[in-house]
Image (tube, coloured by chain):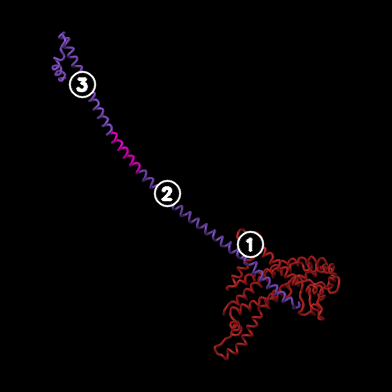
Chain colours: A purple, B red
Amino acid sequence: MNINLTLIGQSITFFFFVWFCLKFVWPPIMGALVDRKKLIADGLAAGEKGKHDLDLAEKRVVTKLKEAKGKAAEIINHAEKRAGEIVDEAKDHAKVEAERIVAGAQSDIEQEVNRAREELRKSVADLAIVGASKILEKEVDAKAHAKMVDNLVAQL
Amino acid sequence: MTAETTGEALTATGYIKHHLTNWTYGQFPDGRLGFAHSAAEAKSMGFMAIHVDTMLWSITLGIIFLGLFRMAARKATVDTPGALQNFVEWIVEFIDSSVRGTFTSKNNLVAPLALTIFIWVFLMNFMDLIPVDWLPSLAGWVGSTVFGVDASHVYFKVVPSTDPNATFGMAIAVFFLVLYYSVKNKGVGGFVGELTLQPFSSENKMLQGVFIPINFILEFVSLIAKPISLALRLFGNMYAGEMIFILIAIMYSTGWVFGIFGGFLQLGWAIFHILIITLQAFIFMTLTIVYLEMAHQEH
């Protein structure tokens, strides 16, 4: 119970411990605590931001989807219209083609007919001469009667 | 109670006295240095003596505290903390919130100071929970077998906070900090003004002159009361608690009926004492913060 040098010793010890605590104990622990607090806050903020971004993205997806649907409908409409047009065009084209083919065929037929007629004419002239010679029992001078025969042929 | 064979240890008074005497090293009146062999010898040494047990235990406990906390501080990570770091952070956060709740100025010293006071005082008080005879008996045994000293002359008081030197040492250290920050923050004039110009003040110069000494007496007493109350509160509580443990321990030597009764008493008192040691450490810390806060406040 005596007051003695221990008093001063204890004060010095106390100051030393406080100094040690101030220098080597408190700052690292407090630093870790503060840093962790910041880390957690940042993490939470990042989570919040992520959620917000997700919301935005969802909204954007919805609008994009709507847009895409609209576009698709538009494209389909357009395609349908175009298809109709193509069909019409094809129809017109086909009609024209058919007409052309028909016309070509007709001209072919006419040509064929003409040729046949020409041949027929030739054959008729020969036949007429042969027939006439048979009738006359005599050789008909083809040259002498050529004019008559030609007239006949022209009449056919 | 240990079987102590000689001298004062035979009587209950001697037993108590033995427990309340510090292991003292110092200068005898004749100028020679050495350990005191009795309470009277220790007293005769006057101021030029040191309580080896108080110093030994307080420093040991301080090293345990700082070593543990330093270990945690060195490995402190921002990621998932380990068990030790968790524990240390729990205490540090508790101290930090206590300081923030009371101390409004900016001073990096206060929180580590509060932490040191709280843990150190707690550990010193905690020595009170170790059965009163264990460590003194061990010391007596070591003294008699290793050093060949009479065991009854080996004094070993293991609770540093039951030594007024320890509590006053801390309180005076805190008081110096209070004075230092008062002068630093308010200036010498401001501090002197705080001591002399309140609570009574007057516009009248004459009256003010009369008030100054009155104010000074009032304020000086309240200033000095701070460290004294701080030290005596802790010392008184711990000393009384220790005394009750010693009185309970005496019952063990009075037959087995009282012995068993004493056992229950000791258990009950120890459980109650857990509250007291924590509370006293906390009060010492809180009052230190409050005094330093007052030193930072302008009036």
Q: Which quarter shows the C terminus of chain B?
A: bottom right
Nearest the viewer among B135 and A119 is: A119
**Prevailing secondary structure of the magenta residues:** helix
Vertically, is B200 above or below B146? Answer: below
Where is B148 relative to A102, above or below? below
Callout 1: chain:
B
Residue B219 picture location, percent across and down: 63, 83
Could you say which quadrant of the image residue B122 lies in?
bottom right
Magenta span? A78-95
Please name the amino acid that badge 2 sits on. Leu
The numbered disc on residue B76 is 1
Percent of width and height locating residue B251:
80, 69
Please state the horizontal and vertical placement of residue A124, each as a whole percent of the image: 19, 16
Picture residue at 61% right of the left edge, 68% below the top: B96
Looking at the rendered structure, whether the residues under marks 3 and 2 are on a common chain is answered as yes
| Amino acid beneath label 3 | Glu
Q: Position of residue A113 (x, y in %)?
A: 22, 23
Q: Secondary structure at mark 1?
A: loop
> For the residues tagged 1 and 2, is the chain the same?
no
Is residue B64 found left or right of A120 in the rendered image? right
Q: Amino acid at mark 1?
A: Ala
User: Where residue A65 is drawn, which disc sits there?
Assistant: 2
Q: Is residue B288 above or below residue A112?
A: below
Q: Chain of mark 2?
A: A
Within 10 Å of the Cα at label 2, are there few (<14), some (14-19), or many (20+) other Cα atoms?
few
When asked about the image quadrant of residue B171, the answer is: bottom right
Residue, far front: A143
Q: Which residue is mark 3?
A: A118
